[in-house]
Image (tube, rainbow, N blue to C red):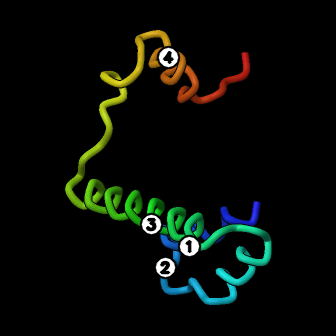
């Protein structure tokens, strides 16, 4: 999908967004509003994530998922060992 690489730029390399990027999306049928929304939303999440990382805030996964899902997550993090 053409929008994903452009929506990713504000997160990874905001200085590299160029008019040509927007022109490609417009030619592909995306509206200016959709492009604006995608860039704005990804930029806001990138900003919030940087604030959180800078303040050493991490998600409390135990509070946000059920015990069953959290148990599966913990199991998936164990190193694979061959018996």
Callout 1: 10 Å neighbours few (<14), some, many (20+)?
some
Residue tagged by mark 4? 69
Residue at 66% of width from left, 24% of height from top? 81
Circle nearer the N terminus (3, 2): 2
* Mark pair 3, 2: CA separation: 12 Å
* Tag of residue 14: 2
Image quadrant in which you'd find residue 29:
bottom right
At mark 1, the secondary structure is: helix
Circle nearer the N terminus (4, 1): 1
* Mark pair 3, 4: CA separation: 32 Å
* Mark pair 2, 1: CA separation: 5 Å
Quadrant location, the C terminus: top right
Residue tagged by mark 1? 9
49 left or right, relative to 22: left
Callout 4: 10 Å neighbours few (<14), some, many (20+)?
few
Comparing labels 4 and 1, the label whose residue is closer to the camera: 1
> Circles 2 and 4: CB distance less than 8 Å?
no
Callout 3: 10 Å neighbours few (<14), some, many (20+)?
some
> Circles 3 and 1: CB distance less than 8 Å?
no
Circle nearer the N terminus (2, 4): 2
Residue at 50% of width from left, 63% of height from top? 37
At mark 3, the secondary structure is: helix
Residue tagged by mark 3? 40
Comparing labels 3 and 4, the label whose residue is closer to the camera: 3
* Mark pair 4, 1: CA separation: 32 Å
Residue 76 image position (x, y, % from top left)? 58, 25
């Amino acid at each position: 999908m053409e929008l994903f690489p452009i929506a990713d730029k504000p997160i990874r390399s905001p200085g590299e967004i160029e008019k040509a990027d927007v022109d490609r999306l417009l030619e592909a049928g995306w509206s200016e509003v959709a492009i604006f929304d995608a860039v704005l939303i990804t930029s806001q999440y990138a900003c919030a994530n940087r604030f959180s990382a800078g303040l050493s805030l991490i998600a409390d996964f135990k509070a946000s998922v059920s015990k069953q899902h959290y148990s599966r997550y913990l199991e998936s993090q164990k190193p694979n060992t061959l018996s």
